[in-house]
Amino acid sequence: MVRILISYSLLFLFNISHAQLTDAMLVGDVQSEGEHVPFATVQIKGTTIGTVTDHTGHYMFNNLPEGTYTITARAAGLKPKERRVTFNKDQTVEVKFILEPDPINLENIVVTATRTTQSRRESPVVVNTLEPKTFSFTQSVNLAEGLNFVPGLRTECNCENCGFNQTRINGLEGGYTQILINNRPVFSGLASVYGLEILPANMIERVETVRGGGSVLYSGNAVAGVVNLITKDPTDNSFSIDVNYRYQGVGYDKPKPDMNSSFNATVVSDDNKSGIALFGYYRNRDHFDANGDSFSEITAIENNTIGLKTFYRPTSWNKLTVDFLRFDEFRRGGNDFNLLPHEADIAEQVEHKITNLSATFDQCFRNKPSDLFSIYVSGQTVDRDSYYGAEQDPGAYGFSQDFSYILGTKYVFGYQFLGGNVLTLGIENIGNDLTDKKLGINQEPNSKINDQKINTTGSFIQNELKINKTKLLLGLRADRYEIINGISSEANNGDWVLVPRANVLHDVTSQLQLRLSYAHGYRAPQVFDEDLHIESSGARTVLHKNAPDLKRETSYSYTGSLNYHSSVGRTYFEVLAEGFYTDLQNAFISEFGVPDENGRVEYVRHNSEAGAVVKGVNLELNAALGTNITWQTGYTIQSAMYGEAEEEFGKKEFYRTPETYGFTVLSWQSPSKLELSLNGKYTGRMMVPHFTEESATLKSSQAFFDFGVRSNYTFRLSNETEMQLYLGMNNLFNSYQDDFDTGINRDPAYVYGPGLPRTLFFGVSFGR
């Protein structure tokens, strides 16, 4: 596998031709409704050449290849337009684009659904995009907070001591979701324990989410769906700086600060052959105690992040892109924060050093503008120092090391048969090596808690066929996974898996679209993120592990949706109703153990022979009322049930899974640059386990509505530079859990509802 990829790499790299000086030029501008559009993207299809318009809406290319090409112009909130242009040596061509409004972003470019570039409206799979403006409207400083404003998604905190969080798609817990960074599944289970909070908003160009059926393209663990974080590209010369303060717990005795600062800068060469985007982020959040018992409900965090994305175009037909990310995070919860962890009554403390590096080489073909060959490699290392312990336990320190990688190649090409076809072929090798140790004391040796190696070799094929008003997408992936456990050979596992997928998009009318899909998925019996978190209290310590005979979990997912979009005057709206049904076979279910004499209890994951079914409806509304008001809302109604009752409480329902939840975001911008936004998150009732020293009970939580408001005003400092001041409050009415446990013997997993109490924030940003 590796030899094949290296051979392909060398073949294409050695065949890169030197660019010829043609002095052919393209100049022009982009306008909409009589106004020039700054920072619109202009690309030459079938090549790697692209740029953005300057702050006056103008663009220029030089030294272009001779021949006839299609030029595309697009911008957020506007419909793209194409022009066919011929370039000749020593000649200059002028092309002006007039773009029509698209305020509900039907034509947004997405890549996650099919691994090919196409507009959201043309995708046979429903793709939701989370844009930087939504992070801004809702004052979401990281990915975990922003995902609450995506239909069918909900982020939850699972531990008061350390803030372990996960996102649920259509009710399925975090292990069923594949997290991607720039299309690559290298964000490992260890990184995912706290990773959603580690990823800052300022590095994000957009987040694409696909509910269900991502397994064909992205291997296992995509049963519920895919969250693809795409970092910012270097497209122009710009910079921005932002500093904001948040005070969590306004109205409580001791509100605590949360300071966030970030910077972004991009530089592109005059000939558009190279560019670099830099970003940095720093966060310092104090712990917060909601009930005055001196134990934290919200952890203390200090986060330093730095990253870059750079590209180089040797010729008009190829491009090398390199991404680098580095995260250094410290977090701690419990009590006695001024003491060392083993001197406190309870402490959960972790320090992460995460490094992510990836490279992609894209090759276009002069005579085949629809064809694209890509070679990619990504790797991530995680070093984690940890302490999970109670009652001054000096033996609760640990150290974890993790390395994950992906090496692959993909070829996309178009051909004519029965209609327009796009065929995608690819092969990948995905690996992970995890070691989790408990450090020895009193001359005892270090002991391994987890020692696992996973290798998956996969190949995939996908064909997209369009005939008149119907688009058919058929895909198949074949995976061979090997799991080697260094602690117990009984946990070794390996198998072949065939993963099919089928999607249909039919344009019933020009405004009404029907989508149907089927997808098969699987989860191998490996170590998951919850296995790498130890839940600690004075009463008990909870560990998660897999049963020795744990078998692969498989899923069969069905969805159907109707999407209607229209306009009345200057009001645009889009409505989507999607039904989903997922059948889990050999579903993973945890069996709660009994604490031993030291208070240690194991939650053992085993297979439910009766399986489980998750079903429901997602509803979405996206509207633009004139040019100044936008409104987005989503609501989910669902049922998540195991086929047999769980032994501890005798219930079939998934725990911590509300039957209803949703969000809304409303924004208004005045002509004078004043902007006001309102947001709300609704969380319905759910069943939450509660463990005390005396008993174990299952409680029904209350429903929550977390309402927030933000206002900002933008000042023009010069033709190219702006400054923005903003102020607001999240969870204005303090819809927050009010029955947290108290004291050293509390149940730290008894936490539900909104992640933050009433929180005041204000800040300033400026840039060009």
Image (tube, grey):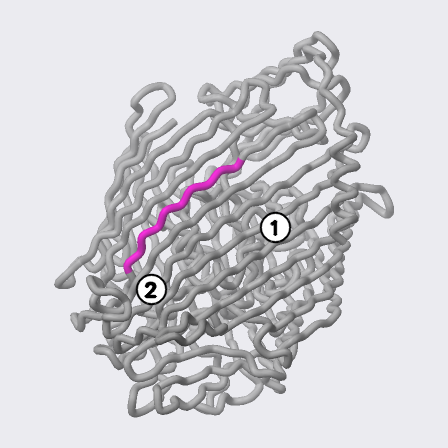
Which residue is more in the foreground, 635 or 217? 217
Rendering coords of residue 372 (x, y %): 73, 38
Amino acid type for the residue under numbered disc 2: Gln
| Point 55% across, 67% down: residue | 176
| Point 73% across, 68% down: residue | 497
Residue farthest front in this picture: 443
Is 413 situated above or below 350?
A: above
Q: Secondary structure at mark 2?
A: strand
> Is residue 40 at least partly visible in the picture?
yes
Amino acid type for the residue under numbered disc 1: Thr
Residue 22 among those drawn in magenta: no
Rendering coords of residue 754 (x, y %): 33, 64
Residue farthest right in this picture: 417
| Point 52% across, 60% down: residue | 402
Q: Secondary structure at mark 1?
A: loop
According to the picture, the residue beneath numbered tag 2 turns out to be: 349
Which residue is more in the foreground, 106 or 20? 20
